[in-house]
Image (cartoon, grey):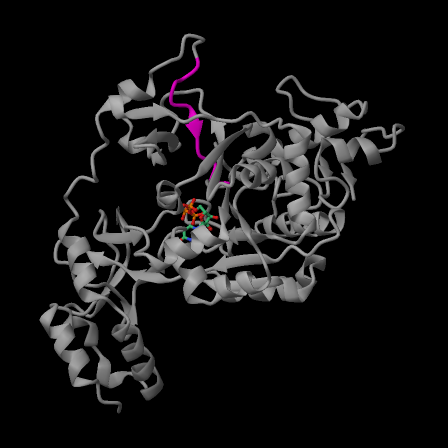
């Protein structure tokens, strides 16, 4: 049996967390050593503070007159700006960061969400679609585009094995990096006791997409980016199959403005839509979460009838590497607290308890909390139809069906812009599934330059 260090025991006792040692004597030596290392990493005092703040409302918004709508640049940019983005890609200054550490609980898919077969004809997975975009970019601009895949404890092993099994989707092996985000224990709402999954096993969750920043620094990824001469990191989330990876117009805007953190936005049309909105507070680009936005503010309209605070956040960003370095070396982000219903092992009754109501606090960092830390920033418009169809739920809105339809409609638009006739139903959806591989075309212009004018759509159609 391994002896627990007296110092760790004292820390557990002082923070009222001795229950974590339940069943210690029955663990194997390896399990004891591993568990002790896990416990030693926990900042018990920080967890205690988070638990104590559970009923404190999040910092209130400043008075309305100090909040302004965010200035948004149009998505069509001058040729010189587009060219600046392309030049940056050609010089190999850009890396792609795909965050894929989430647990995808709403979708209810038993594998990492990136493995979800979303493409309407080939059933290609989200990972395949994203990787083929990166490969197509590197071919188009004759450059290498490092791909950083952020995983978590929950998704790491399966994700890495999948990339290996799929031959890295044709990407050079040395350009694909996996790095894991951190985890956070969950605590009991009433007592603040850290929850166990089983004896000798903490109940851990990924620490949120904001965990990307600390993980970049702690895993050495930032050093690697700097040593490769990378200056800009294109950030996006695995669940959006429509994202235009490293769109040169967006990149060109980011580069010419000298922005530290740039964001795309999709316009919100319905005040009740549950999407965070970018706004200017104290001169900084700041997100207002939908739950924090007062109803009357959400409903304010411009003279032309559009919502005043309409800059919805699809989580597509460009970060300057120097900015990432600065943010990760100065304190980092603040945890958000969520109340969840989680099954846990209860040492008092020696049983797994499946509660019927919320019993646990989970702690997550959000990437958008980094935006106000940027001194220079820029925001660019995009459209949902072209760039945002997230896969969140099993059915209904933001589901596999809606994402597939969005992909088909977009590709049908590209084909129609090339003069191809695409039969559509009254709902606007193509009558036959259509799909365009990123390796065939990354955008409508490329599609027009490649597609045969004789193409007839009479059944499922895949262009590769
Ligand atoms: P969501 O917040 O939508 O979470 O993540 P999710 O895990 O996909 O789904 P639910 O809420 O459990 O149903 C948005 C993006 O952020 C990533 C996800 O992988 C997704 O790309 N993410 C989220 C992380 O990488 N790590 C996290 O800890 C949380």
Position of 454 with respect to 177 (left or right) is right
Q: Position of residue 103 (x, y in %)?
A: 42, 53
Q: In which quarter of the image is the C terminus?
A: top right
Please tell me which residue lies in front, 134 or 463: 134
Q: Where is residue 373 in the image (x, y as percent from the top left)?
A: 36, 44
Q: Which residue of the protein is positioned furthest toward the bottom in this rendering?
A: 1
**Residue at (30%, 78%) from the top-left corner?**
37
**Residue at (34%, 79%) from the top-left corner?**
34
Vertical relation: 236 (above or below) 228: above
Vertical relation: 24 (above or below) 136: below
Please tell me which residue lies in front, 18 or 68: 68
Q: Position of residue 38 (x, y in %)?
A: 30, 73
Q: Which residue of the protein is positioned furthest toward the top in this rendering?
A: 303
Q: Position of residue 137 (x, y in %)?
A: 70, 47
**Residue at (71%, 44%) from the top-left corner?**
438
Please tell me which residue lies in front, 402 or 80: 80
Vertical relation: 34 (above or below) 19: below
Is 148 in the magenta? no
Would you say the magenta stretch is mainly helix, strand or loop? loop
Q: In this orientation, does residue 88 appear?
A: yes
The mark tally for this picture is 0
Q: Quadrant of the N terminus?
A: bottom left
Please tell me which residue lies in front, 318 or 4: 318
Residue 203 lies in what quarter of the image? Answer: bottom left
Q: In this orientation, does residue 199 appear?
A: no
**Residue at (9%, 71%) from the top-left corner?**
14
Position of 291 with respect to 307 (left or right) is left
Residue 185 lies in what quarter of the image? Answer: bottom left
Q: What stretch is highlighted in magenta?
A: 306-316
Is 311 in the magenta? yes
Position of 267 with respect to 290 (left or right) is right
């Amino acid at each position: 049996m391994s002896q627990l260090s007296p110092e760790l025991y004292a820390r557990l006792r002082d923070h009222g967390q001795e229950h974590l040692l339940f069943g210690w004597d029955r663990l194997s030596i390896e399990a004891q050593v591993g568990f002790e290392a896990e416990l030693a990493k926990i900042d018990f005092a920080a967890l205690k503070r988070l638990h104590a703040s559970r009923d404190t409302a999040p910092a209130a918004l400043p008075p309305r007159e100090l909040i302004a709508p965010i200035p948004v640049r149009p998505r069509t940019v001058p040729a010189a700006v587009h060219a600046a983005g392309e030049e940056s890609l050609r010089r190999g200054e850009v890396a792609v960061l795909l965050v894929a550490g989430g647990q995808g609980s709403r979708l209810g898919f038993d594998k990492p969400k990136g493995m979800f077969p979303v493409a309407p004809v080939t059933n290609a997975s989200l990972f395949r679609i994203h990787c083929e975009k990166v490969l197509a970019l590197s071919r188009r601009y004759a450059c290498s585009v490092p791909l950083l895949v952020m995983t978590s404890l929950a998704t790491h092993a399966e994700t890495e094995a999948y990339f290996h099994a799929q031959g890295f989707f044709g990407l050079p092996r040395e350009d694909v990096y996996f790095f894991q985000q951190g985890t956070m224990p969950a605590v009991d709402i009433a007592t603040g006791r850290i929850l166990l999954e089983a004896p000798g096993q903490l109940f851990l969750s990924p620490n949120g997409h904001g965990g990307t920043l600390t993980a970049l620094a702690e895993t050495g990824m930032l050093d690697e980016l700097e040593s490769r001469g990378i200056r800009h990191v294109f950030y996006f989330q695995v669940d959006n199959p429509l994202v235009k990876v490293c769109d040169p117009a967006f990149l060109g805007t980011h580069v010419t403005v000298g922005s530290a953190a740039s964001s795309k936005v999709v316009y919100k049309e319905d005040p009740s839509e549950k999407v965070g909105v970018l706004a200017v507070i104290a001169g900084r680009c700041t997100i207002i979460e939908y739950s924090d936005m007062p109803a009357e503010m959400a409903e304010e309209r411009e003279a032309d009838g559009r919502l005043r605070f309409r800059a919805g956040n699809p989580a597509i960003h460009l970060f300057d590497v120097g900015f990432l370095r600065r943010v990760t070396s100065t304190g980092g982000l603040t945890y958000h607290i969520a109340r969840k219903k989680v099954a846990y092992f209860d040492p008092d009754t020696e049983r797994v308890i499946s509660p019927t109501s919320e019993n646990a606090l989970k702690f997550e960092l959000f990437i958008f909390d980094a935006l106000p830390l940027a001194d220079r920033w820029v925001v660019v418009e995009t459209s949902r139809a072209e760039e945002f169809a997230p896969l969140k739920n099993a059915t209904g809105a933001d589901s596999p069906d809606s994402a597939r339809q969005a992909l088909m409609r977009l590709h049908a638009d590209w084909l129609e812009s090339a003069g191809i006739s695409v039969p559509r139903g009254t709902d606007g959806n193509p009558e036959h599934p259509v799909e365009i591989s990123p390796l065939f075309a990354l955008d409508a212009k490329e599609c027009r330059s490649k597609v045969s004018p004789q193409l007839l759509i009479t059944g499922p159609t895949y262009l590769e």
